[in-house]
């Protein structure tokens, strides 16, 4: 089902749903950013600080989508929202790369962080749910920016797993090198998704999730 075939009432429902998901995502990530950066700085953890910065990037990304869907015609703002999302990805990748290199060079050494372990574990539960809900609504609505933002949220869950693994390996076995390696996982996903968002390739053609029609690929160049 194309966007044009969606009933106006259904479009309004999907837009409201995306605004709600984005609001919850912003709230969660603000808390996550404060806790992760504070505990990461205390433990000299490149991965944990990078995780906190990713939360800030997620806030910027979600805010761009919120700004887009606050307009009477969200599609008119989609390209600008995608640019903001892409730039936020690239900024994250740059910072985390520098931090990981410093860690490998021995300038800083990661310490144990119980708070970081708990935070990463919680994020691993919350983020996939928010990502799934936003992606489903974004695809049905045909919004590349909403789908791109849902990928940013999903990356946060990938990073949660990487950070959690790095922190646990450091805590259990004293493998300090695991922390910067986990941080570099962030860079890979950030660059990949940033390029996709910049090119506007984040959205598959929307289908009716309610009727269960099969999706088929189509790039959306907003």
Image (spheres, grey):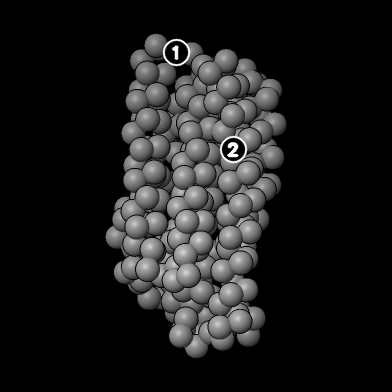
Task: Give SS at disc 1.
Answer: loop
Residue 152: x, y in percent?
Answer: 48, 50
* Residue 196 visible somewhere in the drawing: no
Going by the picture, which residue comes out furthest to the left?
199
C-alpha gap between disc 2 and disc 1: 26 Å
Residue 17: x, y in percent?
Answer: 62, 65
Task: Give SS at disc 2.
Answer: helix
Structural crowding at the residue carrying mark 1, measured as other residues with C-alpha within 10 Å and reported as few (<14), some (14–19) or many (≥20): some
Marks 1 and 2: in contact by CB < 8 Å? no
Q: Which mark is residue 30?
A: 2
Q: Which mark is residue 108?
A: 1
Structural crowding at the residue carrying mark 2, measured as other residues with C-alpha within 10 Å and reported as few (<14), some (14–19) or many (≥20): some
Does residue 172 sit above or below 68 in this rendering? above
**Residue at the spot x=62%, y=17% of the render?**
112
* Residue 21 visible somewhere in the drawing: yes
Does residue 118 sit above or below 89 in this rendering? above
Q: Looking at this view, is 214 or 85 the one in front?
A: 85
**Residue at the spot x=34%, y=68% of the render?**
222
């Amino acid at each position: 089902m194309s966007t044009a075939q969606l009933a106006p009432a259904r479009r309004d429902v999907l837009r409201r749903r995306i605004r709600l998901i984005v609001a919850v995502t912003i709230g969660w990530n603000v808390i996550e950013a404060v806790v992760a950066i504070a505990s990461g700085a205390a433990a000299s953890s490149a991965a944990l600080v990078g995780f906190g910065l990713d939360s800030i990037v997620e806030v910027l990304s979600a805010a761009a989508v919120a700004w887009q869907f606050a307009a009477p015609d969200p599609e008119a703002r989609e390209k600008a929202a995608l640019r903001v999302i892409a730039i936020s990805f690239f900024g994250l990748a740059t910072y985390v790369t520098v931090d990981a290199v410093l860690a490998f060079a021995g300038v800083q050494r990661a310490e144990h962080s119980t708070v970081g372990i708990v935070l990463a574990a919680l994020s691993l539960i919350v983020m996939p749910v928010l990502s799934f809900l936003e992606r489903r609504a974004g695809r049905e609505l045909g919004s590349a920016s909403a789908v791109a933002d849902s990928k940013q949220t999903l990356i946060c869950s990938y990073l949660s797993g990487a950070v959690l693994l790095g922190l646990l390996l450091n805590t259990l076995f004293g493998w300090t090198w695991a922390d910067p390696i986990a941080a570099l996982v962030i860079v890979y996903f950030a660059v990949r998704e940033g390029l996709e968002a910049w090119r506007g390739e984040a959205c598959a053609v929307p289908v009716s999730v309610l009727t269960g029609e099969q999706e088929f690929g189509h790039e959306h160049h907003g």
